[in-house]
Amino acid sequence: MTVTSYIFGIFTAVITLGVVIEMLRRNRLRERHAVWWLFGGALGLVIGIFPGSLEWAASVIGIEVPTNLVFFVSIALLVLVCIQHSSELTRLEDKTRILAEESALLAVRVRELETATGTGPGRLGPHLDGQDTTE
Amino acid sequence: MPNLFARTLIVMPAFNEEAVVGDVVREVYATLPGVHCLVVSDGSVDHTVARARAAGATVADLPFNLGVGGAMRAGFKYARENGFDNVVQIDADGQHDPAGVPDLLALLGEADVVIGARFAGVGSYTVRGPRKWAMKFLSAVLSKTAHTQLTDTTSGLKANGPRAVALFADNYPAEYLGDTIEALVIAGRSGLVIRQVPAAMRPRAGGTPSHAPIKAAVYLGRAMMALAIAYLRPLPKAGALE
Ligand SMILES: Nc1nc2c(ncn2[C@@H]2O[C@H](COP(=O)(O)OP(=O)(O)OP(=O)(O)O)[C@@H](O)[C@H]2O)c(=O)[nH]1
Ligand SMILES: [Mg+2]
């Protein structure tokens, strides 16, 4: 391993962590979603700083080529995040559906109310009957 | 019957049915005096809303397409909010004869969900190929859950009694095919009594059918999956039926 590639590894991990933390800080990312990315970034940083830790972990599990462990963990992480996203999407869709149903039913009630009271959209404005009440 | 009609809400899920929905609503009012008719337009991009309103129906206009399940859940909620005991689902395309509704309502005394079954002797509606196999298979499986012989589980003509309305207002499945398959599974597993009566089907009065023949095979696959998932789901909370 050259010095360049050593620094490159650490640099990438730090950038990833930095971006995630900055997004967290600005409320652009919920902590619930950020947790996996933080975990991955931290793991990358540890391996970047101590490449020996990767070889040690691979030998403990019995993986001959240490990079395969990297691939395995990365893909597993991505799959988990994808599943989490699908589940979030389902929840959001459910909520949107309920909102759509309720809003349609509210519109029916508003309409009935307007019919009953003789009001309606536009009738409450200032230009009704030529009377301008804004001045 | 008039008293029964007054406690009944007719819910019509409608998706781009401007050609027929007005006539169907008028026919419902003429055949079933005293009922209240709610058309749920499911993000229709034609004049479904205006036509249904002109015919005298109350129209709930969903902001985007939710599918029949979402439309029906809105209907059940409307029934609960406005104190209707029974909800009858009728297609907006004119295929169901409103004259068959009293038969369904009459059975609500002993049952919670009454299905108006096609192919049960009355009328001449037929389907072929994968869609037919799917329907056969679904009937066999769902008959077990319902503890009664069902021959047409994908019918869009259904009457729901008070217990079914209470259950479905919150738990009507909104997923694809949920309105037919999963709704029956939920009802059966929740202990509701399901019955079927024969009902005639007419050809579509106008508009376009939503099931193209090419989609039939896909339908078969998705129906199987929907069925499997419906049985794996936890039941809605028991309190829903109290
Ligand atoms: N809410 C809602 N209703 C729909 C949707 N698609 C169809 N419908 C309505 O559901 C009813 C049945 O639809 P059809 O297309 O006639 O389906 P079908 O009766 O099972 O099939 P056909 O034998 O081809 O008529 C009609 O009242 C349609 O307007 C949808 O996406 N949302
Ligand atoms: Mg139809």
Image (cartoon, coloured by chain):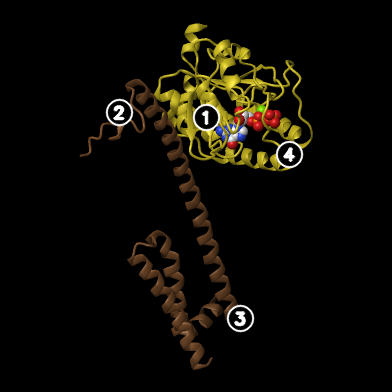
Chain colours: A brown, B yellow
User: The residue under label 3 is which amino acid type?
Assistant: Val
Quadrant occupied by the C terminus of chain A: top left
Q: Quadrant of ligand 1?
A: top right
Residue for badge 3 = A65
Residue A23 x, y percent position in the rendering:
38, 67
Please report whichever mark, 1 or 4, sits nearer to the chain's N-terminal start: 1
User: Residue at point 42% right, 77% down?
Assistant: A15
Residue B10 x, y percent position in the rendering:
53, 20
For disc 3, does the CB lie below 8 Å from ligand 1? no
User: The residue under label 4 is which amino acid type?
Assistant: Ala
Q: Residue A27, relative to residue B95: is it above or below? A: below
- Of labels 1 and 2, the one closer to you: 2
Alpha-carbon neighbours of circle 4 within 10 Å: few (<14), some, or many (≥20)? some
User: The residue under label 2 is which amino acid type?
Assistant: Asp
Query: Residue A129 — which label?
Result: 2
Q: Are marks 3 and 2 in contact (CB under 8 Å)?
A: no
Q: Secondary structure at mark 3?
A: loop
